[in-house]
Image: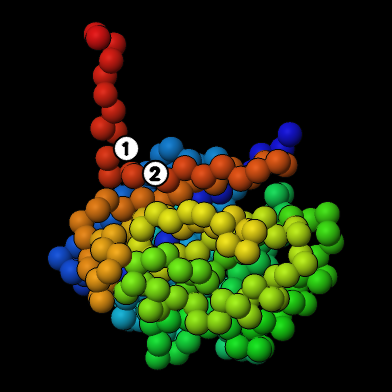
Amino acid sequence: MSVMKFIHLTDPHQTATGSLYDVNVAGRLARAIDHINETQADAALCMITGDIAHWGEPEAYALARRQFERLAMPWHVLIGNHDERQPFADAFPEVPRLDDVFFQYTRETEAGRFIVLDSKVDGSEGGAFCETRLRWLRDRLAETPASTDIYLFMHHAPMRCHIRALDAVMLRNGKDLAMTLKGFRNVRHLFFGHLHRAFHGSWQGIAYSTVNATAQQAAPLFDADRVVPSRELPAYAVAFIEDDGVAIHDISYEQADAVIDIADN
């Protein structure tokens, strides 16, 4: 049975100063890269699901790129709602664009086809897919052989997480995405970011997951009217794709060495 291992890292929210909400986001990203290289260097690739920069500053993208280039494996970035299109494009000129606007592309891997989507709506915290982006996705799904597994990557969650403030900025037209995916039984998993906390489940019969940001987290205050940042620890995820399933581990890298010694017990 073949196994492909890859890294899911999300929401680094880099700034020109390296700090955000009294959190050293530059340091947190650097330590994530260090830990990935030290413990997961055999991963096939790393997928980074958006909000690379918090304010879209060119200096923040330059800082992020320097860190990503230290990864021991190939890496691929997505755009998030906090990202700005032109500075993102300038920092990552290798990322393909649809109609010279939308950052949507595919990557062929040993586990199947990775399809990367652009859910950003300029000027909005929430996301959506216009008809151009949905048509492109339909074409990519239709051209993929039924025997080839498909894995989707995007920034916004298309389903409710039941944290009211986060549901207010989810993907606005999740039903349109669901209709586009209908009938494609080879779509195996949906990976996204945006929520700043671990969140797993199934939607429209498709398994999904996200992981804590490397930046600050969102407190699980389900009835709050605004997102409240928390000091919960950052993480990244390690995904193992096998012929018969997907296994995901969230790695809390800032306390990964806090093991309990039971040798003398």
Give x and y (percent) for residue 160.
45, 69
* Left or right of 6 in this view: 199: left
Which residue: 27% across, 51% down?
Answer: 233
For the N terminus, which image quadrant?
top right
Residue found at the very far left of the displayed protein: 22
Q: Looking at the rendering, which quadrant does residue 161 occupy?
A: bottom left
Q: Is residue 126 visible?
A: yes
Where 24 sits versus 136, above or below?
above
Asked which colour scheme the image uses, the reply is rainbow
State if disc 1 and disc 2 touch (CB < 8 Å): yes
For the C terminus, the quadrant is top left
Task: Look at label 1 and name its amino acid.
Answer: Ala
Query: Where is residue 239 shown, x and y percent of the image?
Result: 54, 46
Residue occupying image coordinates x 73% and y 70%: 182
Question: In the drawing, what numbered circle is on residue 251?
Answer: 2
Task: Decide: few, some or many residues near mark 2? Use Cα within 10 Å; few <14, some 14-19, many ≥20.
Answer: some
Q: Label 1's element?
A: loop
Q: Which residue is mark 1?
A: 256
The single residue placed furthest to the front in the displayed view is: 223
As drawn, the residue found furthest toward the top would be 264
Q: Which is more toward the observer, 209 or 251?
A: 209
Eyeballing the image, is 66 above or below 234? below
For residue 8, side relative to residue 100 (left or right)? left
Identify the residue at image location x=79%, y=56%: 148
Callout 2 amino acid: Ile
Circle 1 packing at 10 Å, graded few (<14), some (14-19), many (20+), is few
**Which mark identifies residue 112?**
none
